[in-house]
Image (cartoon, rainbow, N blue to C red):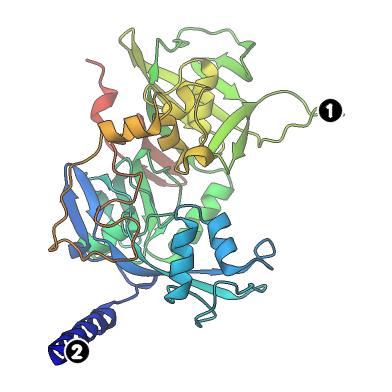
Amino acid sequence: MKRDRDEAEEEGNEERNKRKMEIVWQTPAHPAQKQDYIFHNGKRHVRPYYFEFVSHVNKRWEGKTIVDLFAQEFRGRSRDYYVSAVKCGRIQVDGENIPVSYIVKRCQKISHFLHRHEPPVMAWDVEVLQNEPDVLTICKPASVPVHPCGQYRKNTVLGILQAEYGLAPLYPIHRLDRLVSGLLIMAKNPAKADIFRQHIEAGLVQKQYVAKVVGVFPDAEKKEKKREEEIGDCHEREIQGIQLVDANIDYNAREGRSTAEVGISNGDTTLKGKAACTKFTRISTNGIHSIVLCEPVTGRTHQIRVHLQCTGHPIANDMLYLSDDVVSRSTLGTTADRAASLSGGSPETSCESHKEEYKYCSEDFSIDPMCTHCPNLAPNGYDGHEEGLWLHCVRYTGPEWVYECPYPDWASLT
C-alpha cells in the first residue's frame, strides 16, 4: 500500500512539474493572436495568460519590504496573496527569489509573474476606413483603449489590429479616450508619424467631434452680435453662430477627472489648470437631446466633456460629468468612469445587476491556483455593463490632407 501511495505521489509531482514547465511567461514583446479572444454576451474577452510585469524601485518605494511595497502600492490583491507570491517565487527582485522580509533598494528590477485577466470590451469590429501606404485610419469602437495601458494589453486597438489584420507596427498620431469612438489616424512608420506630429504641434490640424447632449443646446446660427457672459465656472461666448467655451482644464490624475477653472491668477488665487478652448455648434435637437458639433482648439484631458458640462449641456450618458456627486475611483479601486456609473447605488448592487453569467470551460483557459480572478474570464470588478460615451470623432484636417469617419447611429434624433 505504501509503495502504491509513494508511486501515486511521485506521479502527482511529475504532473505538477510538467504543468509548471508548460507555463509561458509573456512579456510586451509577445504579439496578440486571433485565437487569444473569446466572444461572450456581446463582449470581447481575452483568454487569461501568464505575464511578467516589470517595474523598478523608485525613491518612494526604496526602503520598504517587498510585501509592504506591493500591499501599499498595488491594492488590487490582498497582503496574504503577496506573501504567498513572494514565497513561491511569483515575485522576484533582479531575477532572484527573496524572503518576505526583503528590503528593496533604489533602481532594482521587480518582476511580478501572474495570471493576467484583461477587462472585456464591447465586441464591435475595428473597422478599417482607409489603408494607404503610410497611413491607416479606422473607426475606433467605444470602450476599447487605443494602446496598452493599465490592465489592457491585447484588448486594445493596436492589439486587435495586429491579431486580426496583421497590421503592425502602427503609430497613433492623436488620442481618443477609451470610451470615445470614431476616427483614429495611425502612421505606419516613424517618419510619417513625425510629419503628423509637426503639423499638430504647429497648430495646423483642425479636429471635429459630435456629441449627444442633455437638453436644447442654444442655436446661435442667426445671431450676429457678440456677447460674453459667465456661466458657472466658464466663460462662454457666442460669435457668428459658434459658441466658444474658454476655461482652463485642471486634470486630477489620481481621480481620473478634470475640472474647469476661469479667472486670472493673482496674489491670492492661482489657476492650476491649463488653457483650453472649445467651439460648439448645434446640429439638431428633438427637445430632449441635442447633437452638437465640437471643435477643440486645444487638446486637454476630457476637454470636450468638461466644457459641455460648463454650458449646462453635458453629454447625455456621461456619468462622470452629469453630476458632481460621484464616488471617487480611489475609493472603489477602479476607473473614474466606472466609479461614476456605480454612484447611483452601491457598487455591489450595481455590479450584481449586470453580472454576466459566464460558466467556466476548461477549453477556454486553465485555472491558475494562485490567481485571484479565476475561474472568471474578466478580472474582479470588470464583469458589468459599460457603454461608450455619446462622443464621436468625425474629422481631422491638416495641410493638404483630410480624414473622415461616418457619424454613429445615435447622432440621428429622428
For disc 2, the marked residue is 6
Q: Residue at x 56, y 21 (%)?
A: 244
Camera-side residue: 286 or 376? 376
Query: In 3D space, how far apart are the residues under numbered discs 2 and 1 (Cα atoms)?
Result: 81 Å
The image quarter in which residue 353 lies? top left
Q: Give the structural element (helix, strand or loop) at label 1.
A: loop
Q: Secondary structure at mark 2?
A: helix
Q: Depth check: give the residue in front, 398 or 78.
A: 78
Q: Is residue 60 left or right of residue 293?
A: right
Residue pushed farthest front? 1
The mark closer to the camera, 2 or 1, is: 2
Residue with the most extreme bottom position: 3
Crowding around mark 1 (Cα neighbors within 10 Å: few <14, some 14 to 19, many 20+) is: few
The image shows residue 93 at horizontal and vertical percentages of 54, 77
Q: Kindly identify the amino acid type of the residue bearing the numbered disc 2.
A: Asp
Which residue is label 1 attached to?
A: 266
